Amino acid sequence: MQELSYSYRDRQVLADVSFALDAGEVIGLVGPNGSGKTTLLRCLDRILDPEGDIRLDGRDLCSMNRPEISRTIAYVPQNGGTSGSATVFETVLMGRRPHLRWSVTEEDERKVSEALSLLGIGGFASRRVDRLSGGERQRVLIARAIAQDARILLLDEPTSALDVRSQIEVMALLSRLAEERRLAVVAAIHDLNLAARYCHLLLILKDGRVLGRGTPPSLLTGRMVRAAYGIEASVKDEMGVPYVVPLRPSNNDNLVEIE
Amino acid sequence: MMTDFGREEYARLTEKRALFITALILILVALVGIAVTLGSADLPVADAYLAIFAGLFPGAVDLPERMIESNAVGIVWGWRLHRVLFAIAAGFGLAIAGTVMQGVLRNPLASPFTLGIASAASCGASVAIVLGAGILSGGYLVVGNAFLFAMLAAGAIYGMARLRGMGSETMILAGVALMYLFSAVTSLLQYVGSAEQLQAVVFWMFGSLDKSSWPKLGIVTAVVAAVVPLLLWRAWDLNALAEGDEVAKSLGVPVERSMAGFMLAASLVTAVIICFTGTIGFIGLVAPHITRMAIGADHRTLLPASGLVGAALLLGADCLARTVIPGTIVPVGIMTAFLGIPFFLYLFMRRRDA
């Protein structure tokens, strides 16, 4: 992906964002609120039309039609995205829409069952989605994306509604799926430590620009956290994984520049 | 990891849906028989079916003497059957239009009425009745105006949504605004009109099947039969749209184009029905809800099933409207409200308890 830019009315939300994404990799998008994480994900799925170049195996994403994109890229929005009266099974079945014509095949049902089982929500397949807790609903959305059978998985804060145990379960699952099925996963994540532990690469966004990219240990330093979030933090090493402890807002965050 | 989570339940749900639709068809067939017996000439239910059959396949059945004497076939085919079938076609179409609008706009209150299409039709009819102005003349003056105004309202909603960005809220607000505007114009026309004109406008707005005829039935059926298969074919798009524009787009639905197409189709069906019947309320609002409560929200089955519920409701309401006060036909628009709303509230309250 090269020099991606997106403007909404007069405001530039993304400016010259470039990065490469490989199969089997989990990339974490981090950065403060309003830094452009969600916009970047929407651009990648072409829900928005950015300027710049997105290539998939060398092919321009703009040259692909909508059904083709939706068979290749699955997107899990941050919140909402379910309809009230559908059951869990039916909601996950929606992920099969890019593949099915009209009737639901044996294979579609199998993929849905499998996704439900992967997310540990097979037990309430016939419950209505609007009767679920926030965390259960978030799992349903992820299951739908998995049932979509796409090679690229885009997730907008997939763990925001989950408790601690579910957070690590879901992140471990994403990382395992990336490896086993050779998926490329991009997840916007607020929790730096969760991102550090489960992502192969991090991309830090601020004000629509890339502040830094690299592996978690190389990227998550006190200086970088200060530059991105304007806070003082101590960064510890937990068996090779950086662990960020936020301390206090910095006084001079405007003065800090990286590189 | 291989499991069958949810597949059995899903199969059961599919079965339940098929059963629901079958039951509705049987209810409708029974209702047709009952409805055809209603009228000044006495006709038992069995004779009613026989007369329908004899008209369909002339010479295939030996009619009993009493039916030949009473000209049962002539009465049924000449006077009664088109009204019954019109009720079915109109109820079917209105309910499907309501289902589509609720699905596309993701709003349980969306219907041809809350979106101003019905009040635009009333306004068009009023212009024809009070001012005598319209695009068609003679017997079709009122009908032509009602249709034109309804389509104009739909076009205006679409245009405004287009300018402001296609969103369900924009469409609903534009529709509600138009509803008030057209109602105001209708009120003004009623205010300046003569007593007879006022009566005619009010009667038109009650909604009634009294003016049904075979040609009108033909027009409504042709439009419904042309539009419904298209809607069914795109049923997955409706399912996806129910999950939100963003998700729908990400699942491969061309969101703006689909929304416009669905709204246009629903408006067309509504307009072509209410221009003949006047405003028949609540079918488009209630039938989708009843059906969704019964069999869930998959539009592949929701669309036909809620159409059948609408057909049964309208036909049932018409039967009651013709019998509840002997010698008087209560306008069916009033009857659908009396019948549909308590039933709807009952289901709604029961559901909340559960």
Image: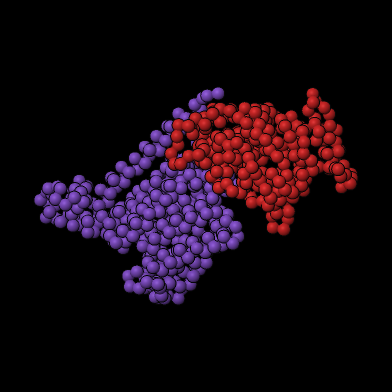
Chain colours: A red, B purple
Q: Residue at x 20, y 49 (%)?
A: B53
Q: Is residue B59 visible?
A: yes
In percent of width and height, residue B17 lies at 40, 38
In percent of width and height, residue B59 lies at 14, 50
Q: Residue at x 18, y 50 (%)?
A: B57
Q: Residue at x 86, y 43 (%)?
A: A259
Q: Is residue B340 visible?
A: no
In percent of width and height, residue B197 lies at 38, 73
Farthest front residue in view:
A58
In percent of width and height, residue A99 lies at 50, 39
Task: Answer with left or right where residue A46 lies relative to residue A37.
Answer: left
User: Camera-side residue: B323 or A35?
Assistant: A35
Task: Answer with left or right where residue A40 lies relative to residue A211.
Answer: left
Q: Quadrant of the N terminus of chain A?
A: top right
User: Camera-side residue: A97 or B329?
Assistant: A97
A236 above or below B167?
Answer: above
User: So how many labels did they put on this image?
Assistant: 0
Quadrant assignment, res A159: top right
Farthest left residue in view:
B65
User: Camera-side residue: B133 or B251?
Assistant: B251
Task: Answer with left or right where residue A167 lies relative to residue B292.
Answer: right
Quadrant assignment, res A121: top right
User: Camera-side residue: A4 or A199?
Assistant: A4
Q: Residue at x 77, y 44 (%)?
A: A210
